[in-house]
Image: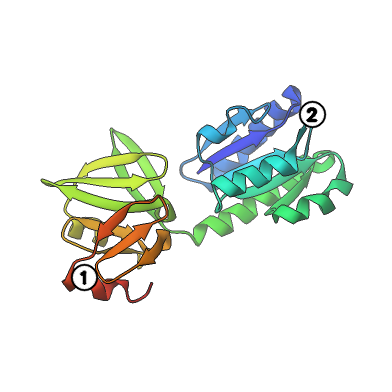
Amino acid sequence: MNIALIDDDVVFLERLKTLSNTYCKNLFKGYQIDTFLDEKKLYEKKYEVYFLDIDLGTENGIEIAKCIKEIYADSIIIFISSKSYLIFNALKVQPFYFVRKSNVEEELAYAFFLLKDCYMQKEYYSFKYNYDDVNLLVDDILYVEVNDHLLTIVTKEKSFYIYKTIKELLNEIDSKNIVQINRKNCVNINHIISENKTTIKLDNGLILKVGKMYKKNLKQF
């Protein structure tokens, strides 16, 4: 899980990171926490969870949350603030939770507890890549392509290259959302935006052919 912490108070941001590390160690197998004092580099990478101060001095945390949701619609926003009355304005972006700075330890712990329950319901594909353990959220997979036994898993953020067959990959992922559409390609049905008799179009603009014998795999779409 990739987590972003955004707050313009350096001291509080460090405390938030320390607490978050403590809770994550007890709840998640793999995670990464990055901190930001403003939004300048925030959109360069996707995070599953954003802990965001509503009142960021000259910047509006609610507007930043809107931008995050426009780019990464499935990301989770958790607002943090010392001003509880701002929660009503924050509801318009449908945050996952709200943490008050005055009670940060208790409420942050509960926020991570809720996140644990949320992510237990999500599907992950775990594999080794360049000697590292990767826990890839299945929802993030756009499509898969195989060429000469080299299989490419494509997400919006990056691509992973591994030596497997499509059959092996499908058995390992074991998700009804990843379906084969021709001899070389599998797609995530959640990223299909249109379909006709011979092709499908993904939300990144890519158009892929659908083989006759694989049309039945798309009936659930």
Of all residues, the one furthest to the left in this rendering is 148
Label at residue 161: none
**Residue at position x 61%, y 50% from top?**
76
Q: Nearer the viewer, residue 201 or 133?
A: 201
**Residue at position x 72%, y 42% from top?**
63
Q: Mark 1 points at which residue?
A: 214
> SS class of the residue under badge 1?
helix
- Quarter of the picture holding the C terminus: bottom left
- The 10 Å Cα crowd at callout 2, few under 14, some 14 to 19, many 20 or more, is few
Label at residue 58: 2
**Residue at position x 73%, y 23% from top?**
10
Measured along the vertical axis of the image, is residue 63 above or below residue 201? above
**Kind of residue at badge 2:** Thr
> SS class of the residue under badge 2?
loop
Could you tell me how far apart the alpha carbons at marks 2 and 1 are, in whole angstroms?
Answer: 53 Å
- The 10 Å Cα crowd at callout 1, few under 14, some 14 to 19, many 20 or more, is some
| Chosen colour scheme | rainbow
Q: Which of 182 and 12 is in front in this view?
A: 182
Residue 156: percent from left, percent from top:
41, 44
